[in-house]
């Protein structure tokens, strides 16, 4: 991923998260490979197509990478189809389960409540990631 971003000329953030896969033998185990996660920050985020436009709510452990994927339409899906790629809101969580519960709660909000939440921290609907790339 790092080489892909460098190849594409993307600027790397200082808080880039790293995943390390250790072979079972290196851990003194015979169990399947496990992932060691060095960061304990998870993000619930809202993307928009434009002000008061189509919204998308997601959760990730690497906000920089995930927004880049949305902007470059790496995975064809809802956000690519409806051109939803402006980061208008995000919040940090230390626990992945807490982040997932919050995402599900936000998805159940009425549209009016989602707009109020976004405008409480980003009244002009600026793309919060515009300086990242």
Image (cartoon, helix red, strand yellow):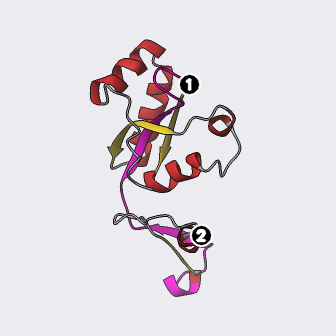
- Residue 110 visible in the current orientation: no
Is residue 81 magenta-colored?
Answer: no
Q: Quadrant of the C terminus?
A: bottom left
Compute the Cα span from label 1 to label 2.
29 Å
Residue 128: x and y in percent read: 37, 42
Q: Nearer the viewer, residue 106 or 74?
A: 74
Residue at the spot x=54%, y=39% of the render?
85
Is residue 35 magenta-colored?
Answer: yes
* Residue 67 higher or lower than 44, as above or below: below
In this figure, which residue is indicated by the disc labeled 2? 4
Residue at the spot x=63%, y=72% of the render?
32
Give the side of residue 82 with respect to residue 42, left or right.
Answer: right
Q: In the rendered structure, find residue 115 and report the number of the disc placed on it.
A: none
Residue at the spot x=41%, y=46% of the render?
129
Residue at the spot x=40%, y=19% of the render?
115
Q: Which picture quadrant has residue 91?
A: top left
Q: Which type of secondary structure does the marked residue at label 1 adopt?
A: loop
Q: Nearer the viewer, residue 83 or 39?
A: 83
Q: Which picture quadrant has residue 8?
A: bottom right
In this figure, which residue is indicated by the disc labeled 1? 54
Residue 33: x and y in percent read: 60, 73
Segment tinted magenta in the rendering: 25-54
Q: Which type of secondary structure does the marked residue at label 2 adopt?
A: helix
* Residue 99 higher or lower than 105, as above or below: below
């Amino acid at each position: 991923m790092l080489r892909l971003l460098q190849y594409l000329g993307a600027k790397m953030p200082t808080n880039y998260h790293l995943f390390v896969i250790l072979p079972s033998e290196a851990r003194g185990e015979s169990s399947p490979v496990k992932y060691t996660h060095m960061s304990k920050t998870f993000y619930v985020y809202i993307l928009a197509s434009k002000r008061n436009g189509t919204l998308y709510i997601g959760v990730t452990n690497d906000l920089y990478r995930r927004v880049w994927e949305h902007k470059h339409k790496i995975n064809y899906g809802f956000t690519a189809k409806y051109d939803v790629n402006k980061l208008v809101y995000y919040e940090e969580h230390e626990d992945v389960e807490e982040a997932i519960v919050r995402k599900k709660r936000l998805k159940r909000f009425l549209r009016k409540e989602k707009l109020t939440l976004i405008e409480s921290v980003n009244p002009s609907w600026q793309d919060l990631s515009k300086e990242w790339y």
